Image (cartoon, rainbow, N blue to C red):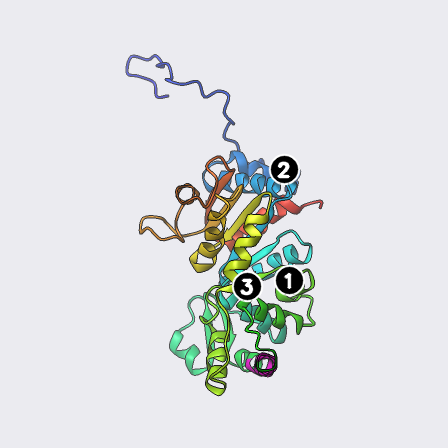
Amino acid sequence: MRQSSKGYIPKTTANVDHLPKIKGWDFNEKFDLQGFLKSYGTTGMQASNLGEAITITKAMMREKATIFLSYTSNMVSSGIRESIRHLVEKKKVHALITTTGGIEEDLIKCLKPFVLGSFKAEGRFLYEEGINRTGNLFVPDDRYAYFEKFVNPLLEKLYKEQKKTGKIISAAELIDYLGSKMDDKSSILYWAHKNKIPVFCPAIMDGSLGDLLFFHKQRHRDFQLDVTEDMQKIVTLAMNAEKTGVLCLGGGVSKHFCMNAQIFREGADFAVYINTAAEYDGSDSGASTDEAVSWGKIKAGAPQVKVTGDATILFPLLLAGVLEGK
């Protein structure tokens, strides 16, 4: 409280002495990762939101909640792929929701890696050299040639099976089938198939895999993919869970599909968002957890937090705080 011009300190209108005192990590101390991460809780600003996110994620795992992890494709483009793969390998999450890039790029990286480039690289030069830029990552065109060579024979096999049995598979079944054909333990889809963790992609046509499905449809006009079955599966998973927790990296359709499923059980029991989007334009990407409460996507009394920032920085820190020693 500011000192008045008369020299005395006015009384506060409320007693706040019981609240945590603001204090960050003291680098005079011997470094300890868990102590360092714990100090985020009393640092303030988004650091304290990250500290709260660590606490909530620990709680959802401790309470054995069914955890839905949604993420945009750039998480897989980047090294966050390894963080997600670890969670799937160790069965720490129970459903994945992503965009088409999150599917195809996981597979492409098993065939050939992405490389670190520069945000400042000139687009015209990259185009002439056959290099695609995702932020400061470079993805040469040949990666998609390898991907096409891998996927097309599998689509042909699926078509023949569809003709034989009459069964129309869902997008999640297609993704699981692709994962079953991988023999690479660095792959998210490899572990998702092995551990029977469903991977949902509500916008399966929006990406390179969608392009291949389009061309496949031109060759076989009677080929079909059921995009409605996955809604049945994710809603059933949410409704049958005793408790649910949501971890949403980024926004877009993956976040919305994840959160929409929670409506059918009158809201998730735990929620952590990490993204850079703001809510001023009314987008679901930028929507706060409290806005989600108004839709019944998160229970009103549920532990919930949005951490505003780059998930490539924040998510590994969150996992370090949650998984250290486990």
Left or right: 248 with respect to 7? right
- Any magenta on residue 188? no
Please provide percent x and percent y for residue 191: 67, 63
Which mark is first along the chain, 1 or 2? 2
Left or right: 211 with respect to 9? right
- Any magenta on residue 156? yes
Check disc 3 and give the amino acid type.
Val
Which mark, by number, is residue 76?
3
Mark 1 is surrounded, within 10 Å at the Cα level, by few (under 14), some (14 to 19) or many (20 or more) other residues, namely: many
| Residue stretch in magenta | 148-162
Verify CB contact (< 8 Å) between mark 3 and mark 1. Answer: no
Please identify the dominant SS of the magenta region.
Answer: helix
Q: Name the residue under label 2.
A: 35
Q: Mark 1 points at which residue?
A: 192
Can I make out residue 71 in this image? yes
Q: How many labels does the image show?
A: 3
